Image (cartoon, rainbow, N blue to C red):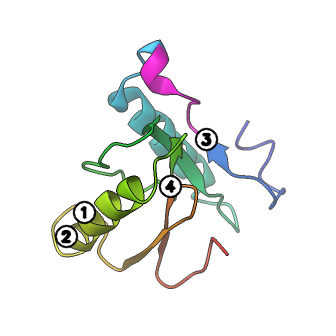
Amino acid sequence: MVTELKDFDNLYYEICNEPYFGGVTLDWQRHIADTIVETEKTFPSHHLISQNIANNQARVKNPNPAISIFNFHYASPPETVAMNYALNKVIGENETGFQGHQRHPLSDGSLAVHPGGRRLVQ
């Protein structure tokens, strides 16, 4: 699928919609994100990868550096945004692989992350 869609720049990949209801593990989600990254490594451009975190609110813990967008269904701002914004200020200072990434809390509770100053979310 990733190879077939490589020339389309108007999409992003969501690993799994509401994985917490179907018992989809974080290990499986990490595997899928890593597979997308590996498949796209020789492509001239890369797509954003989204991970659905929770309904309402949850902390993003040990984020995969391949993830560009964290989605929260039925987010409960400002708590969700504030909780993860504060967490990501700490993440930027530790060893999680997010050093140099810019994080943007969005009005719907998502947290968009993009590397090296490349603007991925308006």
Q: Which of marks 2 and 4 is in front?
A: 4
* Cα distance between the residues tagged 1 and 3: 22 Å
Question: Residue 60's x, y, as percent?
Answer: 32, 49
* Cα distance between the residues tagged 2 and 4: 18 Å
Residue type at mark 2 is Val
First to last magenta residue range: 14-21
What residue lies at 47% left-to-right and 74% top-to-bottom?
Answer: 115
Element at label 3: strand
- Give the vertical position of 115 relative to 14 (above or below): below
Q: Are marks 2 and 4 in contact (CB under 8 Å)?
A: no
* Cα distance between the residues tagged 1 and 4: 14 Å
**Which numbered disc flags the more N-terminal residue, 3 or 4?**
3
Element at label 2: helix
> Which of the numbered marks, if any, corresponds to residue 14?
3
**Which numbered disc flags the more N-terminal residue, 1 or 3?**
3
**Which numbered disc flags the more N-terminal residue, 3 or 2?**
3
Question: Residue 82's x, y, as percent?
Answer: 34, 64
* Cα distance between the residues tagged 2 and 1: 5 Å
Q: Do the residues labelled 2 and 1 touch (CB within 8 Å)?
A: yes
- Image-based side of 43 in relation to 18, left or right: right
> Which of the numbered marks, if any, corresponds to residue 62?
none
Which image quadrant: the N terminus?
A: top right
Q: Does the magenta stretch include residue 20?
A: yes
> Which of the numbered marks, if any, corresponds to residue 87?
1
